[in-house]
Amino acid sequence: MKISIIGAGYVGLVSGICLADKGNQVVCVDVDRGKVDKINKGEAPIHEDGLGALLTKHVGKNFRASADLHEAVLQTELTMIAVGTPFDGRDIDLGYIRQASQDIGEALAEKPDYHVVVVKSTVVPGTTEGVVRETLERASGKSAGDDFGLGMNPEFLTEGVAIRDFMNPDRIVLGGIDERTLDALRAVYAGFESTPILETNPSTAELIKYTSNALLATMISFSNEIAGLAAKVGGIDTSEVMHAVHLSEYLSLDVDGHRKKAKITSFLNPGCGFGGSCLPKDTKALAAQGESLGAPMRLLEQVIEVNLGQPQKMLELLRQFLPDLEGKTVGVLGLAFKEGTDDMRESPAVPIVEALASCGARVVVFDPVAMPAAQPLLPDDTTYAEDLASVIGTADALLLVTRWDEFLELPSLMRELGREDVPLVDGRRFIDKHAIRNYSGIGL
Ligand code: UDX
Ligand code: UDX
C-alpha cells in the first residue's frame, strides 16, 4: 500500500520504516527540513536500535522523507498522523493534531479518490471522532465515512527497542469508524498474521493506549510508595519485598520447572521515577480529561504526585553521606530517562541535577549517549565528563539515574581507581548493594 505518515519523530519514523520493510511504499512528512534531509541521506536522526540499517536498506527505494504534506497525501492511499501530543500544563495539547488534520483536509479537498486517515499519536478518548473528524471535514468539505475513512491505531513501542516492538508486536489495535476503514487498516497490517488483532471503534482504541500506560505508571508509583514506607521503618529492602511479590502465581509462571516472572514485574520495582515521552504526559492528560468530564481519577493523580517526589528522595539519601552539599562534587551517572535511548524528555535526571545545583553542589554528569540531548535542559554550569572513570575520580558522591550496562563495572572501577569509599546512591537499584562500601538506594 502507498502510505504517508505525518511526523517523522520516533513513532512516525519507526512505523514508517518498518511498514516499508513489510513491502509498503512509504513517505514520512515532517516540518523539520533538517530532519527530512538527514533521513533522505539514510542517516538516523535519533538513537534507535536497527533504525540506521533499515534506512540504508529502504531510503531511495520504497521509503523517503518529505516536507511536502500536500503532495504526500495526494500520492498515497492512507495517511497516518504521528505528530507529538504534549501536555501543556493543564490538558493534552492537540495543536499539532489540529494542524495536521487541517493540512490533510485541504489536500483531500483536491483528491477525487477515497483516502483513509489514521491517528497514530496518543490522543485522549474521543479525539479522533471529535477534533480530527471535524477538522478534516471542514477543511476538505467532505464527509467521513462517505468520502474518506477515519481510524485510530495506537502504537505500543518501547523506546530503544521500537523497531523490534513494531516488527514483533504483542497486539495490534485497529479502531475504525466503519468496515471500509478497517479493511484498509487490515491491509496495512497484513504481514502480522501471528499477532492478536483487536478491532474496535476509535475511542476504545484511544483508551486502550492510555490504560496500558497508566497501568505501568501505577505499578511504578505503587512500588515507590512502598519503598517510601520501608525506608522509614528501617531494616527493610524493598527490592527483596518486590522480588517475593513477583513470585506470586499472579505475576509469574512455572515454565519447565523454573519460575518465570511476567514482564510487568519489571515495573514493580523501586526507583527514582518514571520519565520519557509517554508515561508522564499520558498519565497527566488522562487525569486532566477525567477532571474535565467530572470523572476525577484520584488514583492516577496520586501516581503522578508520587512520581514528582522521587527525585527529591535521591537528595535525601545523598544527605546521609553528605549533609551539606555546598561546594561538593556530585557525579550523576546516566541522564536519559532509561537505558538504550538518548531521549531526555521528562527524565528524572533533570530535576535531580537542578536540585543538586541549587544546593550549591558542583555537578559532573556522564551518559554514554544522551549528553548532547541533555545539554539544553541542564543548568549551564554542569560539567560533562568524558567517561565513567573521570566522574569516579573527581566526585565526592555518585548518583545513578539510568541503567546503562557499562555502569555495572562501577564496583570494580571504583576499586581500581582507589575510590571505593565514594558513596553511591542507586536510583535504579542496579548495582549489587554488597559490592559498594558506602551504598544507598531507593527502597533500602
Ligand atoms: C509520538 C506520538 O505522536 C505521541 O502522541 C506519542 O504519545 C509518543 O510518541 P514522538 O514521535 O515521540 O511522538 O514525537 P516527536 O519526536 O516530537 O515527533 C513528532 C514529529 O512531528 C517531529 O519530528 C515534528 O517536527 C513533526 N511535526 C510536528 C510535523 O511534521 N508537523 C507538525 O505540525 C508537528
Ligand atoms: C512506555 C511503554 O512501555 C510502552 O509500551 C508505551 O508504548 C510507551 O511508553 P517507554 O516510555 O519507551 O515505553 O519506556 P518504558 O521502558 O516503559 O519505561 C518508562 C519509564 O519507566 C522509564 O523512565 C523507566 O525508567 C521507568 N521505569 C520502568 C521505572 O521507573 N521503574 C521500573 O520498574 C520500570
Image: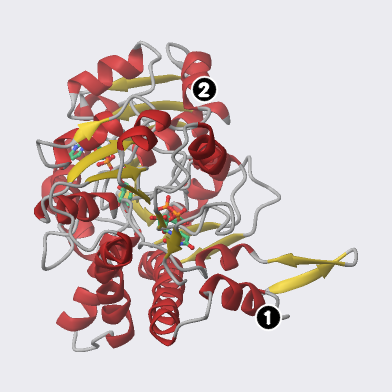
113 is higher (above) or lower (below) than 296:
above
Find out if the beta carbon at label 2 lies less than 8 Å from the nearest ligand 1 atom. Answer: no
Q: Which mark is residue 95?
A: none
Quick one: label 2 or label 1, which is nearer the N terminus? Answer: 2
Name the residue: 29% across, 32% down: 371
Task: Choose between 341 and 399: the one closer to the eye.
Answer: 399
Residue corresponding to mark 2: 54
Dividing the picture into quarters, in which one does residue 115 lie?
top left
The residue located at (36%, 29%) in the rendering is 390
Element type where label 2 sits in the image: helix
Residue 105 in sight from this viewpoint? no
- The mark found on residue 250 in the picture is 1
Q: Nearer the viewer, residue 223 or 194?
A: 223
Q: Is residue 195 visible?
A: yes
- Provide residue 62's location: percent of width, then percent of height: 47, 19
Q: Nearer the viewer, residue 160 or 155?
A: 160
The answer to whether mark 1 is within 8 Å of ligand 2 is: no
CB under 8 Å between discs 2 and 1: no
**Residue type marked 2:** Leu
In whole angstroms, how far apart are the C-alphas of marks 2 and 1?
39 Å
Q: Nearer the viewer, residue 263 or 42?
A: 263
Amino acid identity at mark 1? Tyr
- Left or right for 182, reference 380: right
Residue at 69% over, 66% down: 261
Q: Going by the image, does 120 lie left or right of 66?
A: right
Disc 2 packing (10 Å; few <14; some 14–19; many ≥20): some
91 up-or-down from 251: above or below: above
List x then y, in percent, for residue 73. Answer: 28, 32
